[in-house]
Amino acid sequence: MIEMGESKLTMAVPPLLLLTLLSLPSLLIHAAISDAYPTIPGTAPIDGGFSDELKPIRREVYGEGKIFDISHRYTPEMPAWESKEGIGRFLWLAASMKNGSLANNSEMKIPTHTGTHVDSPGHVYDEYYDAGFDVDSLDLQVLNGPALLVDVPRNKNITAEVMKSLNIPRGVRRVLFRTLNTDRRLMFKKEFDTSYVGFMKDGAQWLVDNTDIKLVGVDYLSVAAYDDLIPSHLVFLKGRETILVEGLKLDDVKAGVYSVHCLPLRLVGAEGSPIRCILIS
Ligand SMILES: *[C@@H]1O[C@H](CO)[C@@H](O)[C@H](O)[C@H]1NC(C)=O
Ligand SMILES: *[C@@H]1O[C@H](CO)[C@@H](O)[C@H](O)[C@H]1NC(C)=O
Ligand SMILES: *[C@@H]1O[C@H](CO)[C@@H](O)[C@H](O)[C@H]1NC(C)=O
């Protein structure tokens, strides 16, 4: 009965950005009370408004301290590029049991570069976009494997000098850069902030020329500092080997070596995608 209802309901939903998600009442309720987004991630579960008997546990860390969720929750109040208002309402219940449907079915609409997300080469190179270098073409072997989480100096953007000072050994292929953005909790602030820390063009160039890093992760919405927005992206994405993961949640994880696992959606034709990333120690 439920099976039939589900397939009937999902049939009418267009592909790509409009996704039909089953069993999302908890997310919806969470979205409605998103001011309850925890001030200290990794602490108490959010009060989802359920009774005590029926209450989901929301975690930042799983598996007895071994698995860290480094993706941000999608809420209306999470920051959006150059917006004061956050991403706003992006999820709604298109069919609900309260209104007589066989199941609850949510729909959503969001820019692909929202929250924790990945950029493909088509993001800043039109010819790559036309040639099909979308998020479906990204190498999962780059997005998954041993990774280094490093703290960068808090008083600078990521320049060539900063990159050099980090002394990241050759052979390291995946690095997540924790910056002042994490200390400032910028991803938890609704208003977009142009003063975030990111790569300056010379820092990006230094990384491409002098390291084996192919996965670059950062803790705000762009890998590039606002002042060098396009130049840094051009440097990183030119060779089509470097994958950029942005908006990571790097709070409350120790610097060091982990196994990173990042999986983008297979959005054909999209130069960006929300991505779920975890670290396993
Ligand atoms: C969604 O489904 C549940 C049953 O699984 C039902 O209790 C709830 O009222 C529904 N929500 C809405 C808004 O219809
Ligand atoms: C149910 O339908 C009514 C009337 O169309 C509408 O006002 C209400 O928002 C709907 N509720 C849900 C949860 O879809
Ligand atoms: C980083 O660069 C931005 C401009 O892109 C600037 O506003 C910010 O102050 C810089 N941060 C640091 C720590 O130097």
Image (spheres, rainbow, N blue to C red):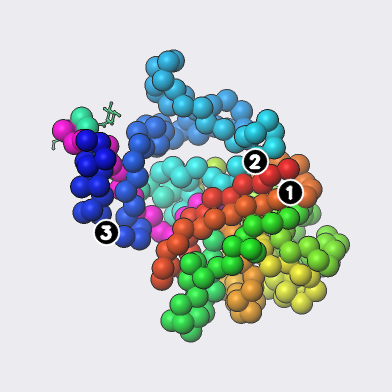
Q: Quadrant of residue 53?
A: top left
**Does the rendering let one see residue 175?**
yes
3 and 2 marks in contact (CB < 8 Å):
no
**Residue beneath disc 1:** 258
Residue 110 position in % (x across, y down): 38, 55
Instruction: Find out whether residue 101 is within the magenta segment.
Output: yes
Furthest residue to the left? 100
Q: Hey, what amino acid is under mark 2?
A: Phe
Q: Quadrant of the N terminus?
A: top left
**Residue found 60% across the figure and 42% down from its top:** 69
> What residue does disc 3 label?
14
Q: Amino acid at mark 1?
A: Tyr
Q: Earlier in the sequence, mark 3 or mark 2?
A: 3
**Which residue range is magenta in the image?**
99-116
The residue at which mark 2 appears reads as 68
> Mark 2: few, some, or many residues within 10 Å (few <14, many ≥20)?
many
